[in-house]
């Protein structure tokens, strides 16, 4: 009885791999295209000219709204649909007027402190003041969504509600070897 042997070409990938790659590329393309179109409809934003142009979370009744159209959660993983939206890189004229401007160098944050009232809408514009990459993160897990990464010479922004509880909220450079570079958001009535 003769047995038939399957001949597998090592030069060509199996058809299912090719189909999978093509389907994956289509899914990524559609998701990216839909992501650009997705906006929170019917939600008035403060300073709408800058909010829409820099892709910041809109605000309704003094509450920051997430991508999903619900109240943004500061304790959500950064960059997820439940977290406040982070902007694309900004030019100086795109930084919202109401923004707290924070610059990072390898040695410090300038200013190293800023104030907010409990529950206040805060727009934080984070800039690199040197030739390095920086990542701002808060120590408090309830503020884990408030994280921004920037490249050399770049500025990005994020809009969020300050915690309702008064206190001192430490932020730091979340880059190995630079965690000792710290600042503080002071929440007080």
Image: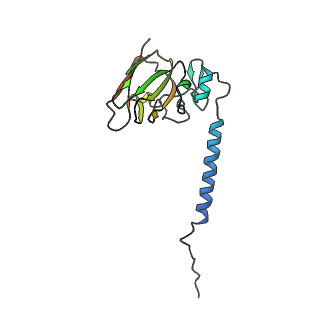
Which residue is nearer to you in this view: 124 or 116?
A: 124
Q: Looking at the picture, how far across and down is residue 129, in whole percent?
A: 41, 29
Which residue is nearer to you in this view: 131 or 136?
A: 131
Q: Would you say residue 2 is visible in this rendering? A: yes
Q: Looking at the picture, how far across and down is residue 91, in whole percent?
A: 53, 28
Q: Is 41 left or right of 84, judged from the image as shown?
A: right
Residue at 60 percent across and 57 percent down: it is 20
Residue at 62 percent across and 56 percent down: it is 22
Q: Looking at the picture, how far across and down is residue 88, in whole percent?
A: 54, 33
Q: Would you say residue 58 is visible in this rendering? A: no
Residue 80 position (above or below residue 116): below
Residue 13 position (above or below residue 84): below
Q: In which quarter of the image is residue 49?
A: top right
Which residue is nearer to you in this view: 60 or 93?
A: 93
Q: Is 54 left or right of 173, judged from the image as shown?
A: right
Q: From this viewpoint, which residue is outermost toward the right?
A: 42
Q: Is 71 left or right of 135, judged from the image as shown?
A: right
Q: From this viewpoint, which residue is outermost toward the top?
A: 189
Q: Looking at the picture, how far across and down is residue 138, in whole percent?
A: 41, 28
Residue at 57 percent across and 76 percent down: it is 7
Residue at 61 percent across and 65 percent down: it is 15
Residue 186 position (above or below residue 80): above
Q: Quadrant of residue 67?
A: top right
Screen quadrant of the N terminus: bottom right
Screen quadrant of the C terminus: top left
């Amino acid at each position: 009885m003769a047995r038939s042997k399957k001949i597998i070409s090592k030069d060509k990938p199996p058809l299912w791999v090719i189909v999978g790659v093509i389907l994956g590329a289509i899914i990524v393309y559609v998701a990216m295209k839909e992501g650009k179109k997705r906006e929170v409809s019917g939600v008035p934003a403060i300073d709408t000219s800058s909010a829409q142009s820099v892709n910041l979370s809109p605000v309704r009744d003094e509450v920051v709204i997430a991508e999903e159209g619900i109240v943004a959660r500061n304790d959500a993983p950064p960059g997820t649909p439940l977290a406040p939206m982070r902007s694309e890189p900004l030019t100086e004229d795109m930084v919202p007027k109401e923004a707290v401007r924070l610059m990072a160098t390898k040695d410090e944050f300038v200013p190293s402190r800023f104030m907010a009232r409990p529950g206040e809408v805060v727009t934080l514009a984070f800039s690199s003041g040197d030739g390095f990459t920086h990542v701002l993160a808060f120590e408090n897990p309830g503020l884990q969504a408030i994280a921004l990464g920037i490249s050399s010479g770049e500025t990005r922004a994020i809009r969020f509600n300050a915690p309702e509880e008064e206190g001192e909220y430490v932020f730091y450079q979340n880059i190995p070897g630079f965690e000792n570079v710290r600042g503080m958001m002071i929440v007080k009535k």
